Image (tube, rainbow, N blue to C red):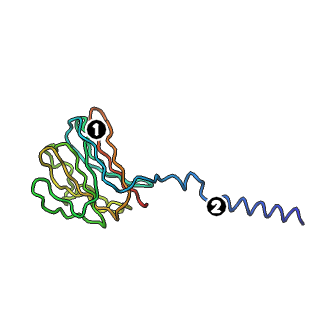
Amino acid sequence: MRRSAALASLLLGAALVGLAPPASARAACPTGWGSLPRSAPSERAGEVVDVRVGTHACHDRFVVDLAGPGDGYFVRYVDQVRRDGSGDVVPVRGGARLEVVVVEPVAATDAFFLPDGELADVRGYPTLRHVAWAGSFEGHTTFGLGVRARLPFRVLALDGPGGGARIVVDVAHRW
């Protein structure tokens, strides 16, 4: 009887351990990104040629593709995103707004706009609510990211593919 009770206890304990997520799953999402402004000087010349979005397990991603090796940016939370050149307010849906300024001019193209005037379809994304165009003026191209709330973010300037580069903004799903 004691042996079967001990075995039952052992099996119950093993079952409970099996129900808990592994430590690696609990700690998989990065922390410590913060929500303060980020910037990097432009040391190389590129040209904005496309934008795209993606969603991952821990964050939503906004990518600005560059023809050439560009690397300058300013990214910060703002009350209102303003259009380059005029200063007019750009409507951006969401509980918070990230202003993304890429220190590179835009290529003369409408190719990265969707038919409804949106820059990217973020329906169903956990964090991103809107990707808005705010213009390009004097070598600066501005986008507005509508975010569910003021959440931590990071910015990466990456080389490639090929001779191009990209500016990546990741916004965490939660604090």
- When the figure is inspected, residue 162 is found, relative to residue 51, above or below; the finding is above
Type of amino acid at the residue the image marks with label 2: Leu
Rate crowding at label 2 as few (under 14), some (14 to 19) or many (20 or more) other CA atoms within 10 Å. Answer: few
Q: In the rendering, at what x and y percent does residue 109 appear?
A: 15, 46
Q: Residue at x 17, y 62 (%)?
A: 90
Q: Which residue lies furthest to the right in this view?
A: 1
In which quadrant of the rendered view does residue 58 lie?
bottom left
Which secondary structure lies at badge 2? helix
Q: Which residue lies furthest to the top in this view?
A: 163
Nearer the observer, 98 or 65:
98
The mark found on residue 165 in the picture is 1
Frontmost of labels 2 and 1 is: 1
Q: In the rendering, at what x and y percent does residue 146 appear?
A: 28, 61
Say which label, 2 or 1, has the lower sequence index.
Answer: 2
Nearer the observer, 18 or 45:
45
- When the figure is inspected, residue 97 is found, relative to residue 48, above or below; the finding is below
**Quadrant containing the N terminus in the rendered view:** bottom right
Type of amino acid at the residue the image marks with label 1: Ala
Q: In the rendering, at what x and y percent does residue 19 appear?
A: 64, 61
Which residue position is annotated with label 2? 19
Q: Which residue is drawn at 37% across and 60% down?
A: 151
